[in-house]
Amino acid sequence: MTKADFIVALKTALPKIFPTKTSAEKAYITFCKILADAAVSQDGVRLPRIGTFTITHRAARTGRNPKTGQAIRIPARKAVKFTPAQSLADRVTQ
């Protein structure tokens, strides 16, 4: 599903709240901003029936350049981790 598809689905599902595509798009953009800002915080984001977004720390490690096979150093960094809720995981495996 693309962003445009999601906006149309949002408008279709809630026509009284989002009478236009523009209003649905503004809601989508606001939701994404709030989600990103909260995910970066120490607490992360927990969305019931969807899952949890948290920030994890990846340690520095040694990798290989796939083109040359030469060993390279991959620096430590932070990464976003998503853990699906059990109800979502169950729907995926059905």
Image (cartoon, rainbow, N blue to C red):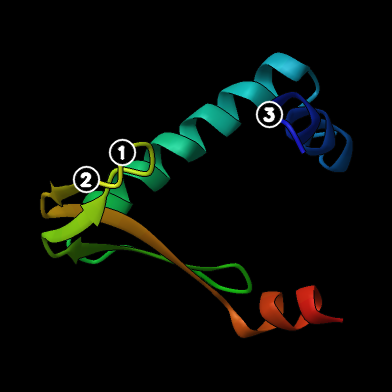
Callout 3 environment at 10 Å: few (<14), some (14 to 19), or many (20+)?
few
Q: What mark, if any, has residue 70 been given in the picture?
A: 2
Q: Nearer the viewer, residue 18 or 40?
A: 40
Closer to the eye: label 1 or 3: 1
Distance of label 1 from label 3 (alpha carbons) = 38 Å
Q: Residue at x 52, y 28 (%)?
A: 29
Q: What mark, if any, has residue 2 been given in the picture?
A: none
SS type, badge 2: loop
Q: Which percent across, then down, holds residue 6?
A: 75, 35
Residue 64 position (above or below residue 87): above
Q: Residue at x 50, y 39 (%)?
A: 31
Q: Which percent across, then down, holds residue 47?
A: 51, 66
- Badge 2 amino acid: Gln
Looking at the image, tell me whether mark 3 or mark 2 is earlier in sequence order.
3
Is the Cβ of the residue at disc 1 closer than 8 Å to that at disc 3? no
Is the Cβ of the residue at disc 2 closer than 8 Å to that at disc 1? yes
* Residue 29 visible in image: yes
* Residue 17 visible in image: no
The residue where tag 1 is placed is 68
Q: Which percent across, then down, holds residue 87?
A: 69, 81
Distance of label 2 from label 1 (alpha carbons) = 5 Å
Looking at the image, tell me whether mark 1 or mark 3 is earlier in sequence order.
3
Residue 76 sits in quarter: bottom left
- Badge 3 amino acid: Lys
Q: Nearer the viewer, residue 69 or 41?
A: 69
Q: Quadrant of the N terminus?
A: top right
The residue where tag 3 is placed is 3
SS type, badge 1: loop
